[in-house]
Amino acid sequence: MVSSTLITTNKEPIATYRSYQEAQKTVDFLSDHGFPVKGTLIVGVGLRSIEQVVARMTYLRAVGWGALSGAWFGLLIGLFLGLFTRAALPLMGVMLWALLWGAIAGAIFGLIAHAVQGGHRDFVSEAGLVADKYEVLVESEHAAKAHELLGKTPH
Protein backbone atom coordinates (compact mmCIF):
# COMPACT_ATOMS: atom_id res chain seq x y z
CA MET A 1 0.00 0.00 0.00
CA VAL A 2 1.32 3.44 -0.96
CA SER A 3 1.05 6.21 1.63
CA SER A 4 -0.82 9.41 0.76
CA THR A 5 2.23 11.57 1.51
CA LEU A 6 4.22 9.64 -1.07
CA ILE A 7 1.48 10.06 -3.69
CA THR A 8 0.99 13.80 -3.16
CA THR A 9 4.69 14.72 -3.03
CA ASN A 10 5.41 17.32 -5.72
CA LYS A 11 1.68 17.68 -6.46
CA GLU A 12 -0.29 20.90 -6.28
CA PRO A 13 -4.08 21.28 -6.14
CA ILE A 14 -5.44 23.21 -9.11
CA ALA A 15 -9.19 22.85 -8.55
CA THR A 16 -11.76 21.55 -6.06
CA TYR A 17 -15.22 20.22 -6.94
CA ARG A 18 -18.31 18.90 -5.18
CA SER A 19 -18.65 15.88 -7.50
CA TYR A 20 -16.28 13.33 -9.02
CA GLN A 21 -17.79 13.95 -12.46
CA GLU A 22 -16.78 17.63 -12.35
CA ALA A 23 -13.20 16.70 -11.41
CA GLN A 24 -13.15 14.09 -14.16
CA LYS A 25 -14.34 16.68 -16.71
CA THR A 26 -11.48 18.97 -15.68
CA VAL A 27 -8.87 16.26 -16.24
CA ASP A 28 -10.51 15.41 -19.58
CA PHE A 29 -10.45 19.12 -20.55
CA LEU A 30 -6.77 19.39 -19.67
CA SER A 31 -6.00 16.24 -21.66
CA ASP A 32 -7.95 17.52 -24.66
CA HIS A 33 -5.81 20.68 -24.61
CA GLY A 34 -2.46 18.88 -24.63
CA PHE A 35 -1.75 19.07 -20.91
CA PRO A 36 0.52 16.24 -19.64
CA VAL A 37 -2.08 14.46 -17.47
CA LYS A 38 0.13 11.51 -16.52
CA GLY A 39 0.44 11.56 -12.75
CA THR A 40 -2.61 13.79 -12.26
CA LEU A 41 -4.68 12.78 -9.25
CA ILE A 42 -8.35 13.11 -8.38
CA VAL A 43 -8.43 12.89 -4.60
CA GLY A 44 -11.63 12.37 -2.63
CA VAL A 45 -11.51 14.33 0.63
CA GLY A 46 -13.79 13.58 3.57
CA LEU A 47 -14.75 10.03 2.60
CA ARG A 48 -17.94 8.46 3.90
CA SER A 49 -19.32 4.98 3.44
CA ILE A 50 -22.93 4.96 2.26
CA GLU A 51 -25.17 1.91 2.08
CA GLN A 52 -28.52 2.31 0.34
CA VAL A 53 -31.18 -0.30 1.02
CA VAL A 54 -32.84 -1.22 -2.27
CA ALA A 55 -35.15 -4.10 -1.33
CA ARG A 56 -36.34 -6.45 1.36
CA MET A 57 -34.78 -9.92 1.20
CA THR A 58 -37.47 -12.58 1.07
CA TYR A 59 -37.26 -16.33 0.61
CA LEU A 60 -38.59 -15.94 -2.94
CA ARG A 61 -35.96 -13.29 -3.77
CA ALA A 62 -33.20 -15.48 -2.25
CA VAL A 63 -34.33 -18.44 -4.37
CA GLY A 64 -34.52 -16.26 -7.49
CA TRP A 65 -31.10 -14.70 -7.08
CA GLY A 66 -29.60 -18.07 -6.17
CA ALA A 67 -31.15 -19.60 -9.29
CA LEU A 68 -29.80 -16.80 -11.49
CA SER A 69 -26.25 -17.03 -10.16
CA GLY A 70 -26.37 -20.83 -10.33
CA ALA A 71 -27.64 -20.69 -13.91
CA TRP A 72 -24.72 -18.47 -14.95
CA PHE A 73 -22.26 -20.82 -13.28
CA GLY A 74 -23.97 -23.83 -14.85
CA LEU A 75 -23.86 -22.21 -18.28
CA LEU A 76 -20.12 -21.64 -17.92
CA ILE A 77 -19.53 -25.23 -16.80
CA GLY A 78 -21.74 -26.50 -19.63
CA LEU A 79 -19.78 -24.46 -22.16
CA PHE A 80 -16.48 -25.92 -20.94
CA LEU A 81 -17.84 -29.46 -20.83
CA GLY A 82 -19.35 -29.10 -24.28
CA LEU A 83 -16.17 -27.70 -25.80
CA PHE A 84 -13.56 -29.88 -24.12
CA THR A 85 -15.21 -33.28 -23.80
CA ARG A 86 -16.82 -35.66 -26.19
CA ALA A 87 -20.34 -35.83 -24.84
CA ALA A 88 -23.23 -37.82 -26.26
CA LEU A 89 -25.23 -34.59 -26.36
CA PRO A 90 -24.40 -31.72 -28.72
CA LEU A 91 -22.90 -28.52 -27.28
CA MET A 92 -26.28 -26.79 -26.83
CA GLY A 93 -27.71 -29.83 -25.06
CA VAL A 94 -24.81 -29.94 -22.60
CA MET A 95 -25.07 -26.21 -21.98
CA LEU A 96 -28.82 -26.33 -21.35
CA TRP A 97 -28.47 -29.35 -19.07
CA ALA A 98 -25.75 -27.62 -17.02
CA LEU A 99 -27.73 -24.35 -16.94
CA LEU A 100 -30.79 -26.17 -15.58
CA TRP A 101 -28.86 -28.02 -12.90
CA GLY A 102 -26.94 -24.87 -11.98
CA ALA A 103 -30.20 -22.97 -11.55
CA ILE A 104 -31.66 -25.72 -9.35
CA ALA A 105 -28.53 -25.98 -7.20
CA GLY A 106 -28.28 -22.18 -6.95
CA ALA A 107 -31.92 -21.87 -5.90
CA ILE A 108 -31.43 -24.46 -3.17
CA PHE A 109 -28.23 -22.81 -1.98
CA GLY A 110 -29.88 -19.34 -2.00
CA LEU A 111 -32.80 -20.66 0.07
CA ILE A 112 -30.53 -22.37 2.59
CA ALA A 113 -28.19 -19.38 2.86
CA HIS A 114 -31.10 -17.04 3.58
CA ALA A 115 -32.68 -19.42 6.09
CA VAL A 116 -29.39 -19.91 7.96
CA GLN A 117 -29.12 -16.16 8.59
CA GLY A 118 -32.17 -16.45 10.83
CA GLY A 119 -33.70 -13.05 10.11
CA HIS A 120 -30.45 -11.09 10.31
CA ARG A 121 -29.85 -8.73 7.43
CA ASP A 122 -33.19 -9.25 5.71
CA PHE A 123 -32.47 -6.58 3.12
CA VAL A 124 -30.54 -6.02 -0.09
CA SER A 125 -28.30 -2.97 -0.34
CA GLU A 126 -25.70 -1.23 -2.45
CA ALA A 127 -22.62 0.19 -0.73
CA GLY A 128 -20.14 2.78 -1.89
CA LEU A 129 -17.76 5.54 -0.89
CA VAL A 130 -18.63 9.21 -1.30
CA ALA A 131 -16.39 12.22 -0.68
CA ASP A 132 -17.31 15.69 0.55
CA LYS A 133 -15.14 17.19 -2.18
CA TYR A 134 -12.75 16.14 -4.95
CA GLU A 135 -9.42 17.85 -5.56
CA VAL A 136 -7.50 17.72 -8.83
CA LEU A 137 -3.75 17.63 -8.19
CA VAL A 138 -1.05 17.96 -10.85
CA GLU A 139 2.73 17.89 -10.83
CA SER A 140 3.96 21.18 -9.30
CA GLU A 141 6.05 21.96 -12.37
CA HIS A 142 2.88 21.89 -14.54
CA ALA A 143 0.51 23.71 -12.15
CA ALA A 144 0.90 27.13 -13.80
CA LYS A 145 0.03 25.65 -17.21
CA ALA A 146 -3.03 23.91 -15.71
CA HIS A 147 -4.24 27.17 -14.12
CA GLU A 148 -3.70 28.94 -17.44
CA LEU A 149 -5.72 26.35 -19.33
CA LEU A 150 -8.51 26.49 -16.76
CA GLY A 151 -8.57 30.29 -17.00
CA LYS A 152 -7.33 30.84 -13.46
CA THR A 153 -4.34 32.64 -12.06
CA PRO A 154 -2.00 30.73 -9.76
CA HIS A 155 -2.17 31.63 -6.06
Image: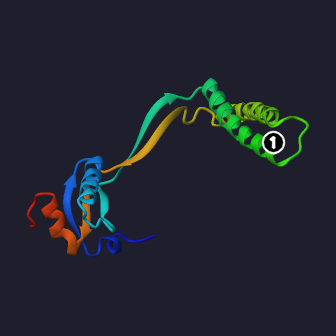
Question: Taking 103 as reference, is 135 above or below it?
Answer: below
Neighbour class for label 1 at 10 Å: few (<14), some, many (≥20)? many
**Residue occupying the far right of the picture:** 88
Question: Taking 28 as reference, is 124 above or below it?
Answer: above
Res 145 quadrant in image: bottom left
Residue situated in front as seen by the camera: 92 or 8: 92
Q: How far across and down, in percent of the image, does residue 45 sit? A: 28, 57
Residue situated in front as seen by the camera: 10 or 46: 10
Q: How far across and down, in percent of the image, does residue 42 sit? A: 30, 59
Q: How far across and down, in percent of the image, does residue 34 sit? A: 25, 63
Q: Quick check: 100 left or right of 2?
A: right
Let me know if residue 133 appears in the view.
no
Q: Residue at x 79, y 45 (%)?
A: 83
Residue situated in front as seen by the camera: 89 or 143: 89
Q: Residue at x 21, y 75 (%)?
A: 141
Q: Quadrant of the C terminus?
A: bottom left
Residue situated in front as seen by the camera: 34 or 145: 34
Question: Taking 93 as reference, is 131 above or below it?
Answer: below
SS for callout 1: helix
Q: Residue at x 70, y 34 (%)?
A: 71
Q: Quick check: 141 left or right of 70?
A: left
Q: How is the image coloured?
A: rainbow
Q: Residue at x 34, y 71 (%)?
A: 7
Marks counted in the figure total 1
Amino acid type, residue under disc 1 in the picture? Gly
Residue where numbered disc 1 is placed:
82
Let me know if residue 130 appears in the view.
yes
